[in-house]
Image: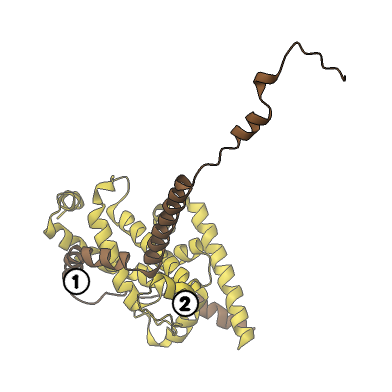
């Protein structure tokens, strides 16, 4: 199925087209979302949300970019919304008895080990992921898309709807900030 | 110098990372979830309207509304005291002669 046929099928609500989309793009979405959320269970849930969103809002896709670029965008937005919601829940946790809670315990997550990392780099990568958590949102997105998803600067720029030079600058600042955060980690230990 | 080397190594630790894959049968799970979401709309509505904050707000609204109507009715039923009659009697305009000179006798 070509991309045009896939889009046409999705717009007609065809389940077979949707199945094809999920099967071909699932690792792309899951890997990006996992990099941002750093939690496998949350990433599984958000990946499902992303595909449901894509299926329900395919009519908004105007074909100005590649389908994968648009899916990346939906994935990043959904993951960031999830993070913000989680942070809000944590911040206003004391209000949950008044507003009715979903009985979700708010616990600190342990070190994140990305399943795609070789054993010898596991510990170092876990430290890096902890540092990535502290980056500003746009630097974090650019770094994950480039380093975890392996996308070029140009592709990152298209997903983030920004210029190539802006992405270069974002990644440069992300690396500088990461080194600074890691230096503090070193001083603490 | 040793710390600097470690930091560089940590920053580059994602080089050669493999893509992570989700659990199998993702499509089946998505379809199941979409069906479940359709089914649970009533449950969501029930959960929403039974939230303590909403119940409290609706309760306060009705109590406020009742108080307003009760106060309004009490105000309407209370007898109106007309103070204009004694005042008019005291300063009866019929006895006022406009031609009477305003002089002290």
Q: Quadrant of the C terminus of chain A?
A: bottom right
Pointer 1 with pointer 2, Cβ within 8 A: no
- Above or below residue A153? Residue A114 is below
Residue assigned mark 2: A129
The disc numbered 2 marks a residue on which chain?
A: A
Colour applied to chain B: brown
Q: Quadrant of residue A157?
A: bottom left
Q: Quadrant of residue A177?
A: bottom right
Q: How is the image coloured?
A: by chain
Residue positioned 32% across, 77% down in the render: A41
Residue A23 seen from this side: yes
Residue assigned mark 1: B29
Residue positioned 39% across, 63% down in the render: B59
Q: Please give the letter of the chain rendered in yellow.
A: A
Indicate which label's residue lies in the foreground, 1 or 2.
1
Which element type, helix, strand or loop, lies under badge 1? helix
Q: Quadrant of the N terminus of chain A?
A: bottom left
Q: Quadrant of residue B100?
A: top right
In x, y percent, where is residue A58?
Answer: 24, 51
Query: B1 and A103: which one is in front?
Result: A103
Left or right: residue B13 compared with residue B33: right
Which element type, helix, strand or loop, lies under badge 2? helix
State how far apart marks 1 and 2 are (Cα).
Answer: 28 Å
């Amino acid at each position: 199925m070509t991309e045009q046929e896939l889009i046409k099928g999705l717009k007609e609500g065809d389940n077979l087209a949707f199945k094809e989309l999920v099967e071909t793009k699932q690792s792309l979405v899951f890997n990006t979302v996992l990099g941002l959320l750093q939690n496998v269970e949350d990433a599984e849930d958000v990946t499902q949300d992303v595909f449901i969103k894509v299926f329900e809002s395919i009519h908004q896709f105007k074909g100005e970019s590649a389908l994968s670029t648009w899916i990346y965008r939906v994935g990043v937005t959904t993951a960031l919304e999830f993070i913000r919601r989680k942070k809000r829940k944590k911040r206003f946790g004391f209000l949950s008895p008044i507003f009715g809670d979903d009985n979700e315990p708010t616990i600190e997550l342990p070190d994140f080990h990305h399943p795609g990392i070789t054993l010898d780099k596991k510990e170092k990568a876990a430290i890096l992921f902890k540092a990535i958590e502290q980056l500003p949102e746009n630097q974090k997105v650019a770094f994950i898309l480039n380093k975890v998803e392996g996308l070029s600067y140009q592709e990152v720029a298209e997903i983030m709807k920004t210029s190539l030079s802006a992405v270069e600058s974002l990644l440069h600042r992300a690396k500088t900030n990461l080194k600074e955060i890691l230096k503090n980690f070193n001083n603490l230990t | 110098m040793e710390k600097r080397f470690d930091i560089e190594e940590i920053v580059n630790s994602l080089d050669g990372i493999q893509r992570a894959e989700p659990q199998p049968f993702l499509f089946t799970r998505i379809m199941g979830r979409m069906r479940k979401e359709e089914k649970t709309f009533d449950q969501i509505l029930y959960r929403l309207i039974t939230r303590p904050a909403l119940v409290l707000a609706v309760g306060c609204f009705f109590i406020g509304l009742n108080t307003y109507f009760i106060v309004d009715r009490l105000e309407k039923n209370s007898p109106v005291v007309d103070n204009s009659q004694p005042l008019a009697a005291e300063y009866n305009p019929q006895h006022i002669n406009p031609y009477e000179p305003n002089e002290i006798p």
